[in-house]
Image (cartoon, rainbow, N blue to C red):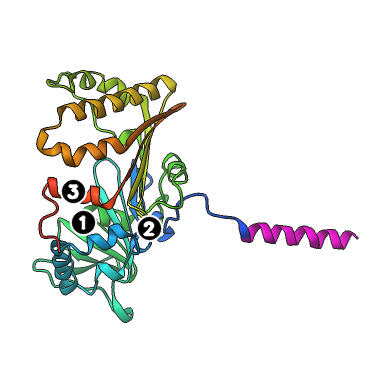
Amino acid sequence: MTIVRILLAMALLVASGCTRTRTSVAVDAALLTQVPRDSVAVGAMRIKAMRNTPAWKRLLENKAVNERLDEIAKETTFDARKDLWELLWSTDGKDGLVYARGEFAPMGLEPKSERKGVTRTSYKGQMMIGDENGAVWFINSSTAVAGRTEKLRAMIDSRDTRKVGPGESLQAKIESIPPSAHMWLAADAAFLPKAPADGKADGPFANIAQNLPMLLRAVQGLTGHVNLADGVNMEFAATCNDEKGAKLVHDSLRGVLGIARIALPSKEKQALLPLLDAMQVEQQKTSTLLKANLTVGQIEKLQEMVGGGSGTR
């Protein structure tokens, strides 16, 4: 009987392991482990997961976008429309880095670039393509990091000794992002902009601007995620020191949305009012959430209004 019980217990453990579902967003470990420990914000676009969404298909119907991607494909061994898998970015508040996973070189060949002024160099055995201002470091044929050349060299210098991956605070925020996210952001308070020294402002947003220093002090961090499976579904959350701070953020966001509805020029009202109507602000204890569910059509109208719709199709 003891053996039977052990076997049954083992079977239950195996079964539970097989049925366990992911509770947070999948992040490519080859990219995340390159993020410097002192980063204050990390974000990502899961390109491979986005490819079958209506929003991605509409993007690739844009003539200007396709022309630019054609140029890049001609200059390199890389076509982002089919060869790019995932993009990650990070910042320490000074330097920004972009990390990519994809098929950067066919048949195991080395990546190349034929763009004028761009050269291929080797630094401590690591291949870099760019110039003295900016470059792309190809860790291997499917993993690359882009940024200031000096920053990339420093990363190569310390690759055997530096702690890899974001700090505990950022990592915890990343683990709170749902698995359905196609794009996401996680940021500590240090990522937030500094409030104006005098706190003065004119116009309808003057009162909110005066409260901005107190509002920024109340926020500990930000997370956000976007799902493109059916339109554009987004949620951003500000985590605060206490419920009082969350209420301040809640009331400020509602105030901004309310004033924006009144202050909108008549020319933009038709496109923007549906977007503002779709936004919901909620307070959940020490966090404030901003949610919105938008159709692809609403996003396209917004792009046309700000000039991003030119050259479509």
Distance CA(mark 2)–CA(mark 3): 34 Å
Distance CA(mark 3)–CA(mark 1): 39 Å
Badge 2 density bin: few <14, some 14–19, many ≥20, Cα 10 Å: many
Number of numbered tags placed on the structure image: 3
Mark 3 — residue? 301
Verify whether residue 11 appears in magenta.
Answer: yes
Mark 2 or mark 3, earlier in chain: 2
What amino acid is at disc 3?
Lys
Q: Main secondary structure of the magenta part?
A: helix
Q: Are marks 2 and 3 in contact (CB under 8 Å)?
A: no
| Residue 296 position in % (x across, y down) | 27, 52
- Answer with left or right where residue 149 lies relative to residue 15: left
Quadrant of the rendered image containing residue 55 = bottom left
Residue toward you, 12 or 108 = 12
Q: Are marks 2 and 1 in contact (CB under 8 Å)?
A: no
Q: Give the secondary structure at mark 3.
A: helix
- Answer with left or right where residue 298 lies relative to residue 27: left
Residue 31's disc number? 2
Residue at figure coordinates x 22%, y 36% from the top left: 273
- Answer with left or right where residue 157 lies relative to residue 165: left
Q: Give the secondary structure at mark 1.
A: helix
What amino acid is at disc 1?
Thr
Look at the picture and state if 283 lies above or below 65: above
Q: Quadrant of the N terminus?
A: bottom right
The residue lying furthest to the right in this view is 1
Q: Which residues are magenta?
A: 1-18
| Residue 196 position in % (x across, y down) | 18, 24
| Residue 73 position in % (x across, y down) | 19, 72
Look at the picture and state if 10 lies above or below 308: below
